[in-house]
């Protein structure tokens, strides 16, 4: 609900059936921009980790460990690419970044998939109250203008830093290829700009 960007809405039952089928066979192009804590290594990769409901919480998902074989687990694949990294000179470990802008492309589309997958590899989304680490970025120390601006931007970001930027599919009635792009909203761009200034 707190993800910005594009969604698909069917205007009638016939279109809904076709779109539902396209989603189920993964025939929809979806690209998201995410701002995450740190930067994944390698900078380009694929996260293939099945997801299932987390314990008794119907609203939370979790990665299913390899040794488990849960009947409710579903295949989940996220392809990612680090677009920009921020605060490299401020990270605790040499070569690390405090945060990064990551493009995520979904091969599958599970509930909270990007959020769970990035958190699973140690790079939760900024602002994610469910799968994140809480407010702030370790390594940012107040007292200089760029750091203060970034600290304030992160603290004031009130949702997960996730934006549905690209949506592509075949028109449900005439089959024409359709592709839509939505630029990130102001809050997302403000956060990115504050981190890019580090």
Image: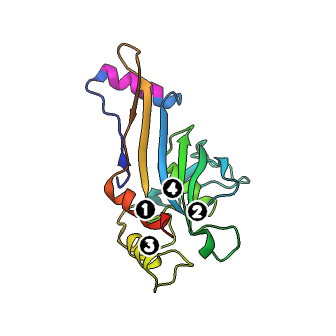
Which is more toward the observer, 109 or 191? 191
Q: Of helix, strand and loop, which one carries label 3?
A: helix
Q: Position of residue 59 (x, y in %)?
A: 43, 56
What residue would you read off at disc 3? 150
Q: Is residue 80 left or right of residue 110?
A: right
Instruction: Identify the mark nearer the N-term, 4 or 1.
Output: 4
What residue would you read off at disc 4? 115
Structural distance between the alpha carbons of marks 2 and 4: 9 Å
Q: Of helix, strand and loop, which one carries label 2?
A: loop
Q: Residues within 10 Å of mark 2 (few under 14, many from 20)?
A: many
Question: Can you tell which of label 4 and label 1 is closer to the viewer?
Answer: 1
What residue would you read off at disc 2? 123
Instruction: Identify the mark nearer the N-term, 1 or 2.
Output: 2
Structural distance between the alpha carbons of marks 4 and 1: 22 Å
Which is more toward the observer, 165 or 149? 149
Q: Position of residue 40 (x, y in %)?
A: 64, 58
Q: Is residue 182 left or right of residue 66?
A: left
Q: Is residue 69 left or right of residue 31?
A: right
Q: Position of residue 170 (x, y in %)?
A: 43, 21
Kindly check if marks 4 and 1 are in contact, taking CB atoms under 8 A apart as contact: no
What residue would you read off at disc 1? 193
Q: Is residue 77 left or right of residue 24?
A: right
Q: Which residues are magenta?
A: 14-22
- The furthest residue to the bottom: 143
Instruction: Identify the mark nearer the N-term, 3 or 4.
Output: 4
Q: Of helix, strand and loop, which one carries label 4?
A: helix
- Residue that appears at 38% across and 32% down: 180
- The furthest residue to the top: 174
Structural distance between the alpha carbons of marks 1 and 2: 19 Å
Instruction: Identify the mark nearer the N-term, 3 or 1.
Output: 3
Q: Residues within 10 Å of mark 4 (few under 14, many from 20)?
A: many
Which is more toward the observer, 181 or 26? 181
């Amino acid at each position: 609900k707190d993800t910005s960007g594009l969604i698909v809405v069917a205007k009638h039952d016939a279109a809904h059936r076709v779109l539902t089928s396209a989603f189920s066979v993964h025939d929809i192009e979806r690209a998201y921009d995410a701002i995450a804590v740190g930067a994944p290594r390698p900078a380009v990769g694929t996260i293939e980790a099945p997801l299932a409901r987390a314990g008794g919480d119907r609203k939370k998902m979790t990665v299913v460990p390899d040794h488990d074989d849960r009947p409710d687990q579903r295949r989940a694949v996220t392809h990612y690419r680090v677009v920009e990294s921020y605060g490299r000179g401020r990270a605790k470990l040499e070569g690390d970044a405090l945060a990064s802008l990551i493009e995520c492309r979904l091969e599958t589309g599970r509930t909270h998939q990007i959020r769970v997958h990035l958190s699973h590899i140690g790079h939760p989304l900024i602002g994610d109250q469910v799968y994140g680490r809480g407010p702030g970025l370790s390594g940012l120390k107040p007292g200089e203008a760029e750091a203060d601006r970034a600290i304030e931007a992160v603290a004031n970001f009130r949702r997960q830093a996730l934006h549905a930027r690209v949506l592509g599919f075949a028109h449900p009635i005439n089959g024409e290829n359709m592709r839509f792009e939505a630029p990130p909203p102001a809050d997302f761009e403000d956060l990115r700009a504050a981190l890019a200034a580090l």
